[in-house]
Amino acid sequence: MGVAATSSQTTKTDGAPDFLSAVAALRALTARDLEAVNAEILARMQSPVDMIPEMAGHLINAGGKRIRPMLTLAAARLIGQDADYDGRHHVALAAAVELIHGATLLHDDVVDASILRRGAKTANIIWGNKESVLVGDFIFSRAFELMVAAKDLRVLQVLSRASSVIAEGEVLQLATQKNIAATVDMYLAVVEAKTAALFAAAAQAGALIAGAGAAGETALREYGRNLGVAYQLVDDALDYAGAEGALGKSVGDDFREGKMTLPVVYAVDRAAPEEKPFWRRVIAEGRVEAEDFDRARELMQRDNAIADTIALARRYAKAAIDNLSEVPRNEYSAALADLVESSVSRAF
């Protein structure tokens, strides 16, 4: 699975821009295309069934950084400067990527029985679980219509394969949740499928539609994959070590849901024999008491579980930067480099 070694060194990346600034810079660079993406999404959400545009609008307008579609747009523009690409299919593909992501969020919230997303009530709480699943299916179908419209079989293969891998990741996560015997490899397999697969496909699709050669396509696919893993690793660490004010959400949600994220995998593996029952109770059995979260963080701090999670994220981030050495140097590749460098120093 690529980078798998750990280290306790967690020095912040020198010269890395603030994450929100890096996202804003990439958004500014892709602003015209991104506006077209948003218009495409709104058009595709229209339906005579009133609930569909209402629920889709609730999800799409609830915020989000639009990182995945921006990867498609930036990859296409990055490659397109040298490949004389002047088409518009990258906009439709970026919209498809965001719709795939939106559909998975609707399904995830049902599976996880989530109440809030980005500070607002989830669709399943407002409309119901059945409705959320069915509208998620509708959004998936719209995404595939956009893929087909690009008239590129390779792109269709890439994005359709990513959709199936994401679903596999959801099932795999169910097998690891509350399983204190889960290993680092099991955890990384979930992350590769649930998160990194769509990051990778988003960047690869943009490169393909703009006419990238084999080397450029591979480099951008691997960039997206490495960025996706690094991004998720940091998210998982932030649930235990993040600053709530900076995050805009509460910490400890993963802990309370019994998720076997990497900090927990490390902590359980490194726990003394007399500490194993604690982890069994709070994770496997889900019997969490008020002081347990603070205790979990103390054990993670002592055993470098969070530090090593961040160190691994930085190794994936470095791999992503190395991938960019295989593509043209321009303002888009620079923005993508800033994005990955800043993603591993978020809100600590």
Image (tube, rainbow, N blue to C red):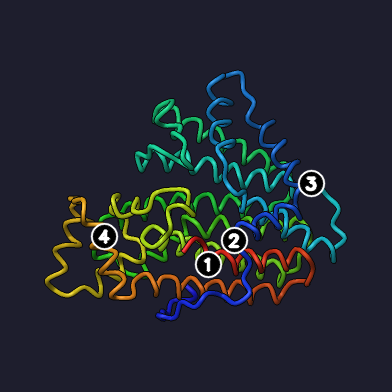
Is 72 displayed left or right of 318 in the figure?
right
Q: Residue at x 85, y 66 (%)?
A: 82
- Residue 19 is tagged as 2
Is the residue under label 2 in contact with that under label 1 (CB below 8 Å)? Answer: yes
Q: Amino acid at mark 4?
A: Asp
In the drawing, does residue 63 fall left or right of residue 296? right
Q: Which mark sits nearer the N-terminus, 1 or 3?
A: 3
Q: Which residue is mark 3?
A: 32
Residue furthest out toward the left: 274
Q: Position of residue 322 (x, y in %)?
A: 63, 77
Question: Marks 3 and 4, how far apart in space?
Answer: 46 Å
Mark closer to the observer (1, 3): 1
- From where the camera sits, is residue 197 visible? yes
From the top left corner, tell me how far across and down residue 288 is, in percent: 20, 51
Q: Secondary structure at mark 3?
A: helix
Query: Which mark is on residue 294?
Result: 4
Q: Nearer the viewer, mark 2 or mark 3?
A: 2
| Point 66% across, 70% down: residue | 219
Dot 4: what SS? helix
Mark 3 and mark 4 lie on one chain; the one further toward the N terminus is 3
Q: Quadrant of residue 266?
A: bottom left
